[in-house]
Amino acid sequence: MTRNSSRNEGFKKILLLTGIISSSLIFHACNAPEKKSQETKSTAKSSAQFDPGGVSIDLSKSTQEKAVPSGENIMINGAFEEIDEKSGNPKGWYSDFHIHTTDKEQEKRLEESIKPITGRKILKDNPPEGKNYILISTPPEAHKIRGDKNPLMSNYYSTTVKLPQLQESTKYLLSFKYKGKLSSDVPGLNSITMAVTCYDGAEKANQRKETRKMLLQHFPVTETWKEGEINFLVPKETGYITLYARLYGCGEAAFDDIQLHKVNIENGVTVRMIPFSFLDNLFCLSSSNPGILTLSCRNEKGEKINKPFIYLELPEKVELVQPRTPLELKEKKEITENGKKYIQYKIDVNKLKNTFQKDNYGTYQGLAFLLHTELPPGIVSSGKYWYEDGDYKTPPRSFDLKVLPSVKGKTPKIFESGVMFNRDADFDTEKGAEMLTSFYKGAGFNVVHIGGSPANVLKGFSDKGIKRYVQPYWLCNGYRLGQAPKTDSAKFKMPDGSYYKEGAFDAICPVEVYTEGKYFKEHIVKPLRKILVEDRSTDSIMPNWEPYMFDFKGCFCDNCKKDFIKHSGLPENEVNKLWPKDIVKAEREKWTKFRSWQHAQMLKTLEENINSIGKEAGLDSHFIPEIAWSQLIENSNCDFAQYNPLDYLEKLPVLEPWGPYVFHSFTKPYIYNTGVHLIVWTAAKEIKDFVARHVNNPAKRPKLIAFPHGYQGSDWVTEPEAISFEFLSFFLNGWEGAIAYIFPRGYDARYWTALAQANTLIADYEDFVFKGKKINDFSFKIETPAPPVNLPKFWSEGGNFSEKLPSLKNNPSIVQGIEYELNGKRMIAVGNFWQKADVFVKLSVSNLPKNKKYVLTQPQINCCFSNAKGETALSPQELQDGMLVHIGALRFSFFVVEEYKNGPVYGTKVTPSDMERFKNERLPEIKKIMAFENEYRTKLAQKAAEENKIPDYALKLKSIKSGKLSCRAEKIDNSEVLRAIIENGDEEFIIDPAGGGRVKSWKCKGTEIVLQDAHLGLAVDAFWWPAEAAAMQTAPYEIDNVEIKGGQLTLSMSHKLKVSGGKYFDGALLMKTYKVSENAKGITISTEIKNTTEKDIRFSFRYHNMLSFLELKDGKSGYGIMKNGNETQRFDRIFTIRLYRLSKDADKDLEKAFRMDNIIQISNGAVEFGAPWTALKLSVDILNKKDLHCFIFWDSGKQAAATFEPLYKIITLKPGMSWNAGMELKTSLP
């Protein structure tokens, strides 16, 4: 970010000579550079540069090419104002829920089980347009039924629009308003999407054929209304368009004001400079260095391409060294425009014409051009480019071109620094290859991730001592190993006896790998030897490693069965009975551990073979899988149980955990999150700590190489300084390397400069990090205004970061620091995660020996800090009292504390008064930006409050007390939302009216009875039938009254039901009462449903309960005991869904709403719960037993606890009538 504030005397604004387009402050200190022998003042003035920081590219100003509507809105009822009374849907619309799987039996079973608890409603509260909007909801319970993050599930509204007769392929704009929220703790795809499918004009819908592939776009999650749009090309033969407003996974998605307009179409191929055509339209070269400018073509109409050419016009002093292979330079000529000389280049792009996309400007096969200039820094000029094919020519597009200082960086000796190229390093001329690889080396990089590039490029990197990593396309994702056809004995076998294919590849049996079978030796080891030894095209293998699509699918071959018997210790005859279809159900834990062990054996085998092959060529080669970062944190979910990193951490010398990725999709609205890069810092720290915790011997701990986000997809971008900052974040937390993923993909000298600066800092301080000792003898206090961290609740790449990284919930500081000690010196790095403004902090250093003097320096800017007397020889007490220092926006400042000695020059002296003066100069701008932060957050909070209003519980929730009974209000997580704390002697109940009136916690003598969950608890009101209304009530309840009378505390609440979009029992009143008696242990809960509507309503009610008794602890579970006459029925957790029927008669509507694994008869509506880890018992007696149908215990291996759900019969209520349900819960101890 460019700084524009005025400077008083002593401060001047300049451009950083590094080439980053932000301002730096030259601070004029009053003293000459300090020597140890010189403490006298000098009248000479010297300069100390302080970098205010910020970013050189403002992503909030990124621009999407807006399509301009040229016709009327042809969407029917896109504002949902008209309702079909028969279906309850908006007129012309259809709604449904779908499981995306090819397994028809699984599809039917899951759809029948999950659809009833999903919601598709028409709501009237605060629509952005008109009177109505649609709300789609899928609760987290749906995932529990699904049992895994796959298959995908979607919930949607859909409509089909008939188009006018098209004379040619036509472009349309679909625009809409949307908002939503996603379930933070549900793995897999959770996303708000809009999808479009085009069909031909066949009259009958079932006879229509698609005219183009479905277009599906995901949109960033926001809890306030945002505008979304999709531009798409409709083929000429299209007669109908079907669109889907869709929610994938779990959460909520609201849509309104959906419009469909014809727009003007590009007549042929178009071309843009990526990504800068969408950012600032500026391309920066560095003086005397090459740069890679990238263009991308789009072919919206799918026009036939005959002889395509790109024309690139550059200033005469800017040379096109080479277009990337396989493009060909056909012509070069000098032209003059406005008295200035330019060179016009004509490039044949025919060999890449099939990569031109219809809907996006793609990046993987971008048209990359290697440029070079000897122009001095500061020169500003322009260039042009256009596309021609025969008589067709696009209008020339101009762009700004600026020359920055040469990119130079020190090369780290220990830390591995590099980038991952795609095809933008494919320069096969001797000049191009040498220029690129020399520049790369000169920027301070020492490794590169590259593959498929010309041999001279690969050799050029190797000759310069740059280690090369490659990902063979035939060695990825766990079981996609070997491209040659496999015999059945080497294939990955599924439970049904079929063999799994990953794309065009037969997946491999893990036994074939770790026993080094015939196929493995012939078709995996030999190809590895070719690339490592014969071709010498790489030094190590670093492939993507995401094997999750193989979860629970096998391998179930006979060889795997034999190894499972050995590993599990189970009797062979027992395994034979269960193998293959029932073994996972019966022995889930053993099978999961076995599969993880197999996976670890595969990794170990690959590492041993690759290391051995590398030695043949004199290389220290390794197998380095690229794994998800969230595998290496304690708080991760159980998605990775079948690939448990603890099984292989000590078997692999190096790992590459990719992510977390912080980025902006420039085709979507920009959302600013204060301190968002703290996610990366925290993940880096926690992952390093995770490895250290689980591998005691430091020598056996794998090195970690990070993949900070570079440029992914067609529009995921970030700022230059952000990549540099993340490199330093990983480095300072002890990671052994970082590779920008992916890079450059069109990025210019601003990005290369930022990374070269990071390389220099890493080279300067890596001895402290890798040879020194991490200590914590420093502290700091922020002395200038700074905002709180505000992280996104949901993120495209990482879901809910605060759930994965719990420390982010603890209001982390926007400023972070770390300290290392080496040979008596201390290095303290302080990072400012606020990207909009700099900060000043009081830095304090403690635990220094008392009998010595010390000096505090900031080598980055060649300065040292003095005391008030101007002395740079500082006492331990002065350093402990603290020195005022400065940290730029999104920057790390490095400070060194060492023993004061005579002789060396420490740099420009900066006194406390100098720093105070500097701080006062910066304060106006810092305050201005802080005002923006406050205003920005206030507006967001106001919008969120309006749309998610919670009742003012303080009016009714007053503190009362009588005897042992009391009730008081407590704020939830430092918010203004209140919950009720009820105490009765040694029992405490926490009631959460804002969370659906649930019991959040119940402790008896310190023992927690309720499973602690962010959304669930005890006595969550819910429905089971009808299917469209089956959902838990988690919206805020109103508190009606709290009182103590006759030794009994009563808390009553109410809630207007909003479940089914106006159908069934919406509008009915739910009234809930909690009663706690002074002379009894436990609580009585009752729910009354009153039909306040004008029609009959029918429903089946249930309580959703999550009890701590039904958790798993130390491999043991609690239990529930019921009676069937004199016979005992006992529920234990075996990961099946069981229904205990109290009613004598079955009810198909209730019992087939969800698939039950077992139906068991009982005769009594009471249950006693216990667990081996506690003497406490809990008895539950159901009220209104005559209407109770059954108890349901919903259990799966991925749940923290099984549910306990009393389910009532289907009830019919006439207007004005009421019905009651309830539970009496009592605790007891022996």
Image (spheres, rainbow, N blue to C red):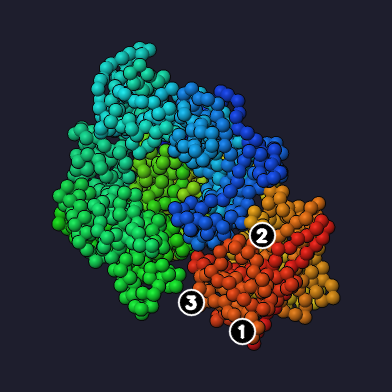
Q: Residue at x 66, y 41 (%)?
A: 90
Would you name the residue on which mark 1 appears? 1127
Cα separation, mark 3 vs mark 1, equals 29 Å
**Tag 3–tag 1 contact (CB < 8 Å):** no
Would you name the residue on which mark 2 appears? 1025
Q: Can residue 872 be seen in this snapshot?
A: no
Decide which of 1147, 672 is in the foreground and name it: 1147
Q: Say which amino acid is labelled 2.
A: Trp
Q: Residue at x 37, y 18 (%)?
A: 392
Decide which of 261, 475 is in the foreground and name it: 261
Query: Secondary structure beneath disc 1?
Result: strand
Q: Can residue 633 be seen in this snapshot?
A: yes
Residue placed furthest toward the right: 1046
Quadrant of the image for the C terminus? bottom right
**Residue 778 location, x and y as percent?**
47, 59
**Residue 869 location, x and y as percent?**
48, 50
Query: Is the residue marked by circle 2 packed among few (<14), some (14-19), or many (20+) residues within 10 Å?
Result: many
Which badge, 3 or 2, comes first in the chain's sequence? 2
Which badge, 3 or 1, comes first in the chain's sequence? 3
Cα separation, mark 1 vs mark 2, equals 30 Å
**Residue 812 location, x and y as percent?**
54, 55
Query: Is the residue marked by circle 3 packed among few (<14), some (14-19), or many (20+) residues within 10 Å?
Result: few
Cα separation, mark 3 vs mark 2, equals 37 Å
**Residue 1025 location, x and y as percent?**
66, 59
Query: Secondary structure beneath disc 2?
Result: strand
Decide which of 1201, 277 is in the foreground and name it: 1201
Would you name the residue on which mark 3 appears? 1114
Q: Residue at x 80, y 77 (%)?
A: 963
Q: Residue at x 77, y 66 (%)?
A: 1220
